[in-house]
Amino acid sequence: MAHSGWPALVFAAEHDAAVISRALRRGRLQRLARGIYSGDIHTPAETLTRRYLWEVVGHFFPQAVVAGPSAMQPDPTACATLYVVHPRRRPLQLPGVTVTPVPGVGPQPEDSPLPARLWLASPGRCLLDFFSQPEAERDLARLHAWWQAGGFEREALLAGLAGQAQALNRTGALAQALAFLDQTAQLAMPQAVSSGLPALSVRARLLMESLIIEGSATQSELMTRLGMSKSTVSSGVQELQRHAFLTVVEGAGRGAQLYQLSQQTGWVLGADIGNSQAMLIARSLDGRQLALRQFVHAASVQLVKAAADAIAALRQELTAFGPLLAITVALSKPVRPDIQLSGREGPSQAGLSPEAILARLALPAGMHIIVENNVNCAVAAEVRLGIAKGLKDVVFLQIGERIGSGIYSGGMLIHGARGGAGEIADIPFPWSEQESPGELMLERHLAKQGFLDRLNARRAPSLPMVRSMDALLERATGGEPMAMQAIAQYGEQIGFLACGLVAVLDPAMIVMGGSVGANWLIVAAVRKTLAAFSPHTTVAATQFGPQATVEGAVQLALEAAQVKLLGRAVRRR
């Protein structure tokens, strides 16, 4: 907002130089950059630059295309360097951001319009630009994060990519761009295959969204909710009824009919397959829980077989709810949803590979399959529905039989270049002149069995052995001094790890989970340790307890199914 009678954005070329100079001397304008001023004299220059960036860029670079790394960011206005395709050669230095012109072809039909006569590079242009770079300059982590967040239609990209390469003079990058798109289609990471769902009209989608978000409604209520005419609602209702997505029940009033989602619309499944136990949750398309299954097996191969049997049984049991539309399989392994991992990526990736687990599950063809890391699913649950709802920077720290973390940064789930982001068990430990790091030593130090072993090794001969963490936590809760001291020391050690995560990732919240990490005594100890290092980082226990991973998994599956059917994910109020 301007405070001096001048507009919030003033370009020197549009005003007399003497008038600008006089306003500056009188404190009625502030200088943002060469030739750019603002009548908002109280707001920092960088804040104003970010706020009016498109107007500034459009003034100096008309018809420019935001491209390169900038076009692959969730918010290009937050970039320190904004790359634009434009014939101008000289960069524009602004407070907090440099606008750098690069050579290339101007706006194309596939590019998206931005304010102020600007354009955003299309996904096809982004891919071709990326693979036109020298291999050493390619940021693969950025590419994969952009691809995962974008939800792009692979088939549409494939259909038009050759033509775009020709128009943009990027034919040399076409082969690698096509190879990348082929990689994204591999079965395990994830499998986006035709679900057999009908293509609904816009009016039918809006009606279905309303029934999911706000529940059943009469025709007049739907007209009010959506601002549709009676004929439009009737047409959409008939379309949904043809596909068996909608049913009619008698309402409370005379002759009133309530429309609601059909039971046969379809359902989704989240499967948390851990090292010794598994949990499954089935939900309807509007989020209602249909089934919960949990079982334990000592051997991972037996556990996977039990999970496969349970999934097959659920498909039979839930036939009345329509087809299984999507499934998320959560594994305690590094996972990249867009590339196939091979070999042993790190010490924490022992056992069956994700591909081998999927093969044993024998999931049906024609279904949307997502494979995700278990702690990544847990952080997704907390950010979407739990204690961290609405936050953009969150770490889920899991402490139990094993240790791990899930990272949500800048509003995106972070996987890393090879899927190992958050695999804290692989951090070398300990570091000292007397000791050398060993494989999985940090996990052995902080996982509950390692802590119990150290505690028992130090105990006085007259004291009994501590047989389980649950027993120790119960004694500490009851006020036993030895148990309270031991838990406080254990929580402090976990807190040191949390401090390391904060130093690297700077999250707004650390959510504690796992059979040990979610205990309130551990949470309190971690909070106390972290407060001395980062008082602005909140520490909280998971809202979902031991179901955090499976809740996140089924939520990801639900969103995938809704996107497939409606074009976007929605949530019941």
Image (tube, rainbow, N blue to C red):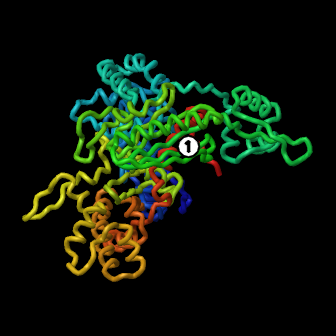
Residues 276 and 48: in front is: 276
Left or right position of 317 against 345: right
Quadrant occupied by the N terminus: bottom right
Q: Is residue 111 above or below residue 25?
A: above
* Left or right of 308, for residue 433: left
Which percent across, then down, holds residue 458? Answer: 20, 74
Query: Label 1 sits on what residue type?
Result: Ala
User: Disc 1 marks which residue?
Assistant: 282
Please tell me whether residue 65 is drawn above or below residue 78 in the rendered image. above
Which sits in the foreground, 93 or 247?
247
Q: Does residue 71 show up? A: no
Residue drawn at x 39%, y 66% is: 537
Q: Farthest residue toward the left?
A: 434
Q: Which residue is drawn at the image coordinates 23% and 30% (left, top)?
A: 134
Q: Position of residue 149 (x, y in %)?
A: 44, 40
Q: Nearer the viewer, residue 374 or 363?
A: 363
Which residue lies at the image location 49% right of the left edge and 43% below the top edge?
A: 270
Residue 6 position, x and y percent, is 53, 56
Which quarter of the figure has residue 479?
bottom left
